[in-house]
Image: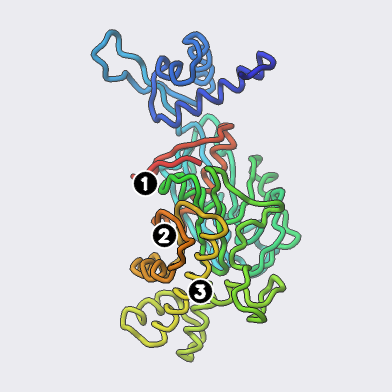
């Protein structure tokens, strides 16, 4: 039983009511009271307060043949909007969405070559985007996904671009006068996957880009570890005394199977200055021997890495967010065929459906939950299966 001051209890009940309204999409006052075990008078008072604050709206009557039709209430998804940014090594992608993660717009720019230009580039990007007008609360939060480690809203380690000494959250907060959240991109990706696509209690989401990150959900909660470094999957060692890594170790996984490394190796085999994934894709579809070799390398090392994840965390599902599995989903079966250990137990290994959008949708989720003060949030975006995070 919850005990405490009347104000504390009312605040807790208000959050429970708002969470129930959002997670049921549309619900009546009576049904809310029944679900939460609160009196109708308490529910009516809280609902009226939320209506006054324009966080919820009345959307019509329930379809019932018994007595007077109850009025349904729902989240006012147009009460405000959020900004979510994927700060990549080569590109920066931004998303604007309402409080349901819907009606969003995207824009992408190149990542500035100099870190001194980064804050101005982020500000200009946000200000150049089409944003909702005349909303009750306006912009309620900005989330920035970092391809590195974050702790206490700061970047503590970013191996493939220089963000040292840049107070990203502080600078953006001061300029836009709104809360700013910095989070590892793999963590945002797993939040996006769970919220909009795969509703499982335990998820391992492998994010393969310039490096390799791992977003971990354990018992429906994001796991970040002691100092935010949980999930640095790319820095697990798979070759003793192997290739040097910016982290200081030798033989880290991402020095063998990150997209950056694999495309560089493919370009070297073809005597090219550089190669895009589109170059590689065409060659692989033509069964080019060098492209086939690169894919075999990806399958080999990814299988070894996933085997380690399965034994370390025993997740329900493993999601691979990589151009290799997204463009060639059949190789997931080849990866599974390499996992012959009797110790392995899982529901499925799947390629990401959301792709890079998972980072942006996860970032939107972080800002929305913080603004609404809600722990568990169910959203449904463009037909994606609802989930909870």
Question: Seen in the image, is 330 located left or right of residue 45?
Answer: left
Numbered circle sitting on residue 301: 3
SS at badge 1: loop
Please give the name of the residue rendered at 61% of the width and 17% of the height, measured from the top-left corner: 10
Colour logic: rainbow
Pinpoint residue 9: horizontal percent, then vertical percent.
63, 18
Question: Closer to the N terminus: mark 1 or mark 2?
Answer: 2
Pair 1/2: label in front: 2
Mark 1 surroundings within 10 Å by alpha-carbon count, few (fewer than 14), some (14 through 19), many (20 or more): some
Q: CA distance from mark 3 to mark 1?
A: 31 Å
Question: Closer to the N terminus: mark 3 or mark 1?
Answer: 3
Identify residue for label 1: 384
Please give the name of the residue rendered at 47% of the width and 10% of the height, measured from the top-left corner: 40
- The answer to whether marks 3 and 2 mark residues whose Cβ atoms lie closer than 8 Å is no
Pinpoint residue 262: horizontal percent, then vertical percent.
50, 78
Numbered circle sitting on residue 217: none
Identify residue for label 2: 349
SS at badge 2: strand
Which of the image's four quarters has the N terminus? top right
Pinpoint residue 296: horizontal percent, then vertical percent.
43, 79
Pinpoint residue 35: horizontal percent, then vertical percent.
44, 21
Is residue 95 at all visible to an observer of this figure? no
Please give the name of the residue rendered at 37% of the width and 46% of the height, measured from the top-left corner: 384
Question: Closer to the N terminus: mark 3 or mark 2?
Answer: 3
Question: Seen in the image, is 265 located left or right of residue 223?
Answer: left
């Amino acid at each position: 039983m919850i005990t405490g001051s009347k104000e504390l209890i009312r605040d807790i009940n208000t959050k429970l009511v708002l969470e129930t309204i959002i997670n049921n999409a549309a619900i009546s006052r009576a049904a809310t009271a029944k679900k939460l075990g609160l009196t109708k008078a308490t529910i009516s008072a809280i609902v009226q307060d939320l209506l006054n604050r324009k966080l919820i709206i009345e959307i019509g009557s329930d379809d019932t043949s018994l007595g007077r039709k109850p009025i349904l209430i729902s989240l006012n998804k147009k009460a405000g909007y959020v900004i979510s940014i994927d700060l990549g090594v080569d590109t920066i992608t931004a998303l604007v969405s309402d409080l349901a993660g819907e009606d969003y717009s995207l824009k992408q720019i190149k990542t500035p070559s100099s870190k001194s230009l980064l804050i101005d580039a982020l500000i200009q990007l946000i200000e150049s985007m089409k944003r909702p007008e005349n909303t009750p609360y306006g912009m309620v939060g900005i989330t920035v996904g970092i391809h590195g480690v974050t702790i206490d809203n700061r970047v503590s380690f970013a191996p493939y671009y220089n963000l040292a000494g840049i107070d990203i959250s502080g600078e953006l907060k001061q300029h836009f006068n709104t809360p700013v959240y910095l989070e590892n991109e793999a963590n945002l990706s797993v939040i996006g996957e769970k919220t909009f696509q795969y509703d499982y209690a335990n998820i391992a989401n492998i994010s393969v880009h310039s490096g390799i990150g791992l977003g971990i959900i354990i018992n429906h909660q994001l796991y970040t570890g002691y100092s935010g470094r949980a999930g640095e999957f790319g820095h697990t060692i798979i070759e003793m005394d192997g290739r040097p890594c910016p982290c200081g170790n030798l033989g880290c996984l991402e020095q063998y199977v990150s997209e950056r490394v694999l495309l560089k190796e493919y370009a070297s085999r073809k005597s090219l200055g550089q190669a895009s994934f589109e170059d590689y894709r065409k060659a692989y579809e033509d069964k080019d021997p060098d492209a086939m070799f690169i894919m075999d390398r990806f399958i080999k090392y990814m299988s070894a890495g996933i085997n380690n994840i399965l034994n370390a965390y025993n997740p329900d599902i493993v999601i691979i967010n990589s151009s290799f599995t997204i463009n060639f989903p059949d190789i997931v079966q080849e990866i599974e065929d390499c996992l012959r250990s009797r110790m392995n137990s899982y529901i499925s290994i799947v390629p990401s459906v959301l792709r890079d959008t998972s980072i942006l949708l996860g970032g939107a989720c972080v800002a929305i939950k913080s603004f609404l003060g809600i722990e568990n949030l169910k959203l449904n975006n463009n037909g994606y299966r609802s989930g909870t995070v």
